[in-house]
Amino acid sequence: MRITNDTLRTAFLHALQAAQQRLLQTQTQITTGRRINKPSDDPFAAARIGEIGAALERLEQYQTNAALARNRLAFEEEALVNVVDNLQRVRELAVQANNGTVADGDRAAIAAELRERLEALLEAANAVDASGHHLFAGYKERTRPFVMSGGSVVYAGDDGQRLLQVGDERLVAVNDSGYAVFERVPNGNGTFTLAADAANTGTGIVGAGSIVNPAAYTRDTYTIEFTSPTDYEVRDGGGVPVTVGTYVPGEAIEFAGIAIEISGTPAAGDRFVAAPSTEQSVFTTVQRLIAALEAPGGDPASRALLHSRVGQLLTDLDAAVNHVVEVRADIGARMRAVDDQLTMNEGFAVQLTETLSDIRDLDYAEALSRLSHQLFGIEAAQQSFARMQNLSLFRYL
């Protein structure tokens, strides 16, 4: 086989071009600090880099969502702290007004402060976040959720609850609807409520009620009617007699698995009702308390009715406080979950970044050594080729 100078020259030029391309790749790596600068450098590693980059972008979005969620929940918690403080003050005023020595004028003054507390509760329920969005309006966050209409507080929001994704498999609720926080409060003891009939003429005062035998309790409306100051009968919602008995002050009246305390001296015809608990607005409870305190209580029967009403409203206030505290506890649990997820996401990001660096980043010591060898190799090849060009007999003829 005959190898000409042209063949040798062509082969050398191809080899030199390949060496220069490798040198250029090394120089590019040193300049960028990355081992892989385009997919052709390492297709498998490039695909892995793309996957890790996408995961890091997701984590960055999760961190943004988590920070937003925590801020929103912090605003809501602060609003509910205000609600609890106001409800506790309302309860203090109710206890003060329920004292038998308080005159009508003093109760009216207490009622006036209660109206201020009602306004403060409305303001807290209509609180907004840093973006001006209402915290307790559900999905209708640009709508003022609670408005006064016809003397009553009306909820104008909905029951929606917004969720934000803070992890691959974790969603967190960033709001609570005003209906869930302020409207969905069980009144009474959570099972039944007690009330004295407005037409009572005696001084009987209905006190606390409790379940003493859950198995015997049937959800119904029961009426305790006194046939004389010392005798009573209990009828169910259909008017069917349940039991009869003799009233002993200080002793509970028991029937259908429940016990009810009545004090004072009821008159013949006086009635007391035990009805199933329902959901009652926090604002309704405060408004009923204001109405009770503004009613005249000059005669003994009116004062007894006042004490019965205020006593039961105190139970409703306790239920409201407990309900809001439970919502706060749930918010606290969500904030803790967000904090945990933030920490977890940060850990994942560090691990992914380290993995990405291992795959993509350049080992400078190895690259510089390789660059030196490549430069030396190209220089030696060029010198060798120059000498080979002189290996011809024509130079010596």
Image (cartoon, helix red, strand yellow):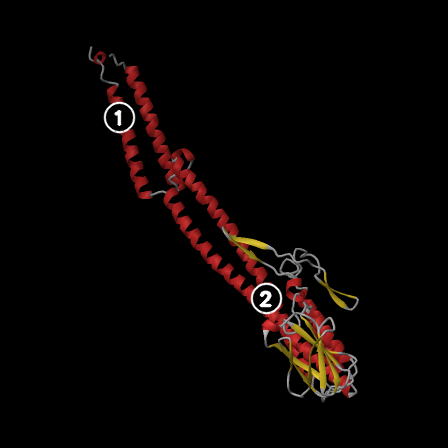
Residue 88: x percent and y percent?
Answer: 63, 76
Q: Secondary structure at mark 2?
A: helix
In depth, the one of 369 and 53 nearer the eye is: 53
3D distance between C-alphas at marks 2 and 1: 83 Å
Q: What residue is shown at x 56% (from left), y 54% (from top)? A: 164
Q: What residue is shown at x 63% (from left), y 74% (from top)? A: 189
Q: Quadrant of the C terminus?
A: top left
Q: Earlier in the sequence, mark 2 or mark 1?
A: 2
In depth, the one of 141 and 101 nearer the eye is: 101
Q: Is residue 127 left or right of residue 168?
A: right
Q: What residue is shown at x 39% (from left), y 49% (from top)? A: 354
Residue 105 seen by the camera? no
Q: What residue is shown at x 33% (from left), y 43% (from top)? A: 364
Q: Quadrant of the N terminus?
A: top left
Q: What number is the disc on residue 383?
A: 1
Q: Are marks 2 and 1 in contact (CB under 8 Å)?
A: no
Q: Is residue 6 left or right of residue 67?
A: left
Q: Secondary structure at mark 1?
A: helix
Residue 178: x percent and y percent?
Answer: 66, 63
Residue occupied by mark 2: 327
In depth, the one of 301 and 47 nearer the eye is: 301
Count neighbours of disc 2 (C-alpha within 10 A) and say few if under 14, some if 14 to 19, many if 20 or more: some
Q: Quadrant of residue 91?
A: bottom right
Please state which amino acid type lies under the numbered disc 1: Gln
Count neighbours of disc 1 (C-alpha within 10 A) and say few if under 14, some if 14 to 19, many if 20 or more: few
Residue 138: x percent and y percent?
Answer: 65, 58
